[in-house]
Image (tube, rainbow, N blue to C red):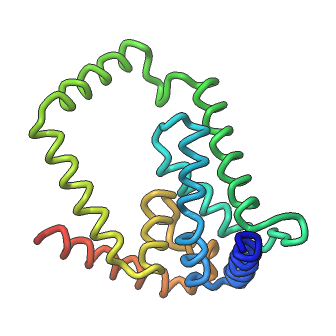
Amino acid sequence: MPGADLAERDQRLAALLAAAARGDTTAFEAFYDATYAYARTVARRVLAGGDTDDLLADAYFEAWRKAASFDAARGSAVTWLLTVVRSRALDLLRQRASHPSVGGQDAGDDEAAAGAAAGADSDPGERLWRHEAGTRLHAAVQALSPPERWALGLAYWRELSHAEIAAATGWPLGTVKSHLLRAQHKLREALSR
C-alpha cells in the first residue's frame, strides 16, 4: 500500500533528522541521500532550471543547523525540507531581482562576460574539457567519506573557518582539521592521476 510506504518513509526520515539534531553526521548523510531528488526537483522548478547547486548546499546546511526544530507532529520531514528549499530559492530570486548587477559590475561588464562565456561555450574542445574536469572532480568528491565531504563543503563552498566548522558540526577542532587535510590529500591524489 502506497500510504503505508509513505508513513514508513516519513518515520525513517524523522528518525534520521532526530539523530542529526544530536550531531550524527552519518544520519544526516542518509537523510541527504534519501531526500536530494525531491529537493533538487523543487529547486529547479522554483529557479526555472537555473543553477541549483549553491541553493541546495545552503538549504541542506540550514537543515543540518535547524534539524532540532523539526516537529513530526506538524508535517513530514520531506515537507519540512522542501519548505526550507523553497524558502531559500525564493530568497535567491528576490536577491537577484533587487541586485541585478553582482559584485559592482555594470551592464557593460555583464555583456562582456556573457560574450566571453559564449565564445568559450562555442568551442567544442573547451566544452569537452569543462565536462571532463567537472566529472572527474565530482567523482573524486563522491569518493570522500561523508564527514570529509561535509567538512570540505563547509570550508570551500560555505567559506567557514575551521572554528566555525567545529561550531556548526559539534566536532572537535582537531577532527575538523583532520577531515579537511585527508579530503584535500585524497582530492589531490585523485585529480593528479
Q: In x, y percent, where is residue 127?
A: 18, 40
Q: In x, y percent, where is residue 24?
A: 63, 85
Is 27 on the left or on the right of 186, as rendered? right
Residue at 30% in and 73% down: 184
Residue at 51% in and 58% down: 158
Residue at 61% in and 38% down: 46
Q: Quadrant of the C terminus?
A: bottom left
Foreground residue among 39 and 112: 39
Q: Does 123 appear above or below 3?
A: above
Q: Does 67 appear above or below 22?
A: above
Q: Does 13 appear above or below 79?
A: below
Specify whether residue 131 is in view.
yes
Foreground residue among 1 and 75: 1
Q: Quadrant of the N terminus?
A: bottom right
Tell me where residue 82 sits by quadrant: bottom right
Q: In x, y percent, where is residue 101?
A: 50, 23
Tell me where residue 3 sits by quadrant: bottom right
Is 143 on the left or on the right of 174, as rendered? left
Q: In x, y percent, where is residue 142?
A: 35, 72
